[in-house]
Amino acid sequence: MSQTKNSAGRKLVDAAAVQKRPLTRANEAMSPQVMSEEAFSCTHLQDAAYYSDDSTLVLHMDVRDGLKLLAEAGVRVNCVVTSPPFYGQRDYDVERQIGLESHPSAFISELADVFDATRKVLADNGSLWVNLGDTYWSGKGEHRSGETKQSARRFGIRPQDKKGDGGWCVPKQLLLIPHRLAIEMQDRGWLVRNDNVWVKPNPIPDQVRDRCSMSHEYVFHFAKERWYYFDKSAVGRTSESGSTLPPLDTWEVPPVRGQAGRHKARFSQELVRIPILTTTPPRGVVLDPFAGSGTSLVFARKHGFRAIGIDAKREYCDLMVRQLESVSETKIGSK
Ligand SMILES: C[S@@+](CC[C@H](N)C(=O)[O-])C[C@H]1O[C@@H](n2cnc3c(N)ncnc32)[C@H](O)[C@@H]1O
């Protein structure tokens, strides 16, 4: 920054230089550094990986261990996109799984801790996208209630079936989990850029009579800093004058229906289209810390980006490798 002195000999800050700074930072954010190919293929990462090739790493481990390993290896990703377990919806039957905490506040804090750990591996001008749906505290207000719809919709224990705490956790209460997480993230220093709404046409109907049927989830866009990489040209809308407008914050995407032997809570590749295409620079790295069947990794691979997936369940890591195999010429063999 250039400086000059006033008549009293005191240093003055050059106002023009100060004004230029945000522009410079904005420009710098649009040419982000991407991790080198050598660093991506280092032996430290390859040795720990369940599967690896030139553009993909699959880590079969707890998300916290995976993020620690990536941070120690000096990994820098450009885009984190993920759908963590939703509160009280599924028992994934893995050690230290997230989602079955007895109180929603414990879930929010576990999840925010995980996202704080992603900060260490996310480039300063990178973005974090989190898909999260909401949960009702059970209308029955008791553990393992005899609801017939329970077995049809979900499997395993539902913490929200336990008797409530008389606070947020009372029968029929919509817990507002997605926004509680977003507020916690704000409190921890993340910048909330959008609460994009995933609108689901033709959702599976809720078995309820006294409220509207749920047909949306959220996809939050968080940034570490004010200046971050965002390329709207890949997904933008064209205005009447021919200029490119950013996409809207409501995304109509049909949900993927489960198939036998497949992951039961997959999201659609269409859901990661805007996150990955807008916030990953050419040959950049996408990270999905709860990768499941590998939807984000497959989309990234199809579009020439590198990708890292973490999942604690071996069966899903196998599925991820098979999915990747189906979009690649390269022969993939899991370790
Ligand atoms: C909602 S699913 C992700 C689905 C994924 N987006 C897809 O399209 O297939 C959440 C995933 O988190 C994983 N998971 C749960 N607890 C975990 C933990 N502590 N560490 C790593 N993975 C975990 C589950 O095995 C599950 O695959």
Image (cartoon, rainbow, N blue to C red):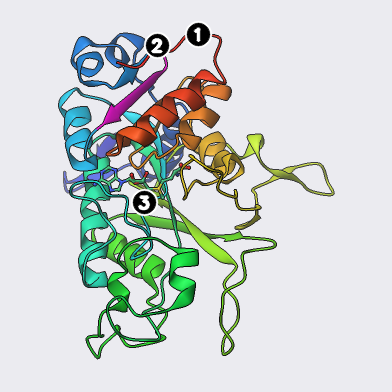
Question: Residue 108's quadrant in the figure?
Answer: bottom left
Q: Which of marks 1 and 2 is nearer the N terminus?
A: 2
Amino acid type indicated by mark 3: Pro
At x 30% / y 38%, what residue is drawn?
313
Left or right: residue 292 versus residue 73 is right
Which residue range is magenta in the image? 54-60
Left or right: residue 6 versus residue 231 is left
Residue that mark 3 sits on: 84
At x 55% / y 48%, what residue is drawn?
258
- Is 69 a magenta residue? no
Q: Position of residue 286 (x, y in %)?
A: 42, 31
The answer to whether mark 3 is within 8 Å of ligand 1 is: yes
The answer to whether mark 1 is within 8 Å of ligand 1 is: no
At x 50% / y 27%, what residue is drawn?
323
Amino acid type indicated by mark 2: Asp
- In three-dimensional space, the C-alpha distance between marks 1 and 2, rounded to whole angstroms, equals 10 Å
Magenta stretch: dominant SS?
strand
Q: Work out whether residue 266 or residue 305 is closer to the camera in this orientation and state it.
A: 266
User: Looking at the rendering, in which quadrant would you find the N terminus?
Assistant: top left
- Quadrant in which ligand 1 is drawn: top left
In this view, 50 is above or below 265:
above
- Residue 54 circle label: 2
Badge 3: residue crowd in 10 Å (few <14, some 14–19, many ≥20): many
At x 32% / y 86%, what residue is drawn?
141
